[in-house]
Amino acid sequence: MASRTSKKSSKKGSSKRSSKSSKASAKGGAGRTRPVLVSKSAAMVSLAAVSGGELDRFVEAKEAWSEQLIKPTGLSASAFAARRPPASPAPEDNISGVGIGEKIIGGRHTGVMAVKFLVRVKYADNQIPPSDRLPAQVNGLPTDVEEVGTFRRFEAAVALAATPDPRSLLRPAPPGCSVGFQDPGGTFIMAGTFGALVRRGQRLFILSNNHVLADENGLPVGSPIFQPGFLDAGNPPVTDRIAELSAFARLQPLNTNFVDCAIAEVFDPSLVTNAIIKIGRPSGAVAARDKMVVHKFGRTTGYRVGFIDTTMMDVSVDYSIGRLKFKNQIIIRGLNGQPFSAEGDSGSLIVERDTARAVGLLFAGSASHTIANHIGDVFQALNVRLA
């Protein structure tokens, strides 16, 4: 979630589930094959009572449906914008995510584990052709359909002529502040969030997203990184180079992604601190868990508290380079009636509130849901650790 505006103008909601199940293999629409369904009633599986074997069944079901419904496009920005249809009840158009999580009925958490379908629009039952209805159960396991809107990488942007609200030039620069690259073509300005200070050996780096520091694979290693990002620097800009792009996990338009991350080496250790604004220094890292209470500080929404809804969601996310597939991502929802994040918060480090341990790296979302990479995957992809 970085923020960007271009001089050029630079979802799939929820289908209702059918009460019917298929026989051994169902087809939905021309040439669309569906995973096997079972006609018996779905078991109500309590979150607290899930055994290893039961979890394996959920994972198997999730993997099968993700393979069918979450597919990258790999199109160029102009082609992607031109071909993207309005959301329709067809699952291949409307599904944003497939994972495992708690079943929610009428806004009430039930304590029941389900195979979850995240949709751009949740259509009324009479608006969905029978061939496009999602199952009420998969191999005897309950399912749930949740409306999330369209997932996009979070990057804030405005037209060059506009004057954004200022984000300060801070020295030492703390995680949570505005950072970004300078567009070599000069067609847009952008800003994202400095997530954490990390190290490899004795070298220090700013951690954020590929799309915040490397422009979706578009910039060469060695490109300058500025704080604040040019979107927040005013006109004339008040900003300065703080680091240079060192490495990034390449985004894969045609294959499955696990992370959207990059690092930029800091010119001088005195220019940065490792204490996140309003949160402080992370105390380490830990694996994300369902219902974990987390917080973050981002360039746009600042300090927000939320909870982890699920840790195993496969999602499709809109980028300038196409609609990309990400596997086994963390989904977070805000507490206190507030969204957890917005455009420009991309790159924020997500931290367990009770222990101050890092759990994820924020990179995308919608108005209601935030998506993050598992922090262990990020550290492994970049070969870094917290500083």
Image: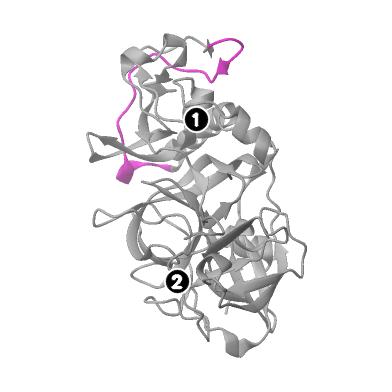
Secondary structure of residue under mark 1? helix
Measuring from the top left, give residue 145's x and y in whole percent. 37, 30
How far apart, in angstroms, are the residues tagged by discs 1 and 2? 47 Å
Q: Is residue 188 magenta?
A: no
Front disc: 1 or 2? 2
**Which of marks 2 and 1 precedes in the sequence?**
1
Secondary structure of residue under mark 2? loop
What residue is pinned by disc 1?
A: 61
**Outermost residue toward the bottom in this view:** 270
Q: Can residue 23 be seen in this view?
A: yes
Which dot marks residue 166?
A: 2
Tell me the kind of residue under disc 1. Answer: Ala
Quadrant location, the C terminus: bottom right
| Residue 311 appears left or right of 236 | left
**What residue span does the magenta drawing correspond to?**
29-51
Q: Quadrant of residue 303 in the image? A: bottom left
Viewer-proximal residue among 101 and 302: 302
What type of secondary structure mainly makes up the magenta span?
A: loop
Residue located 59% across and 69% down the image: 207
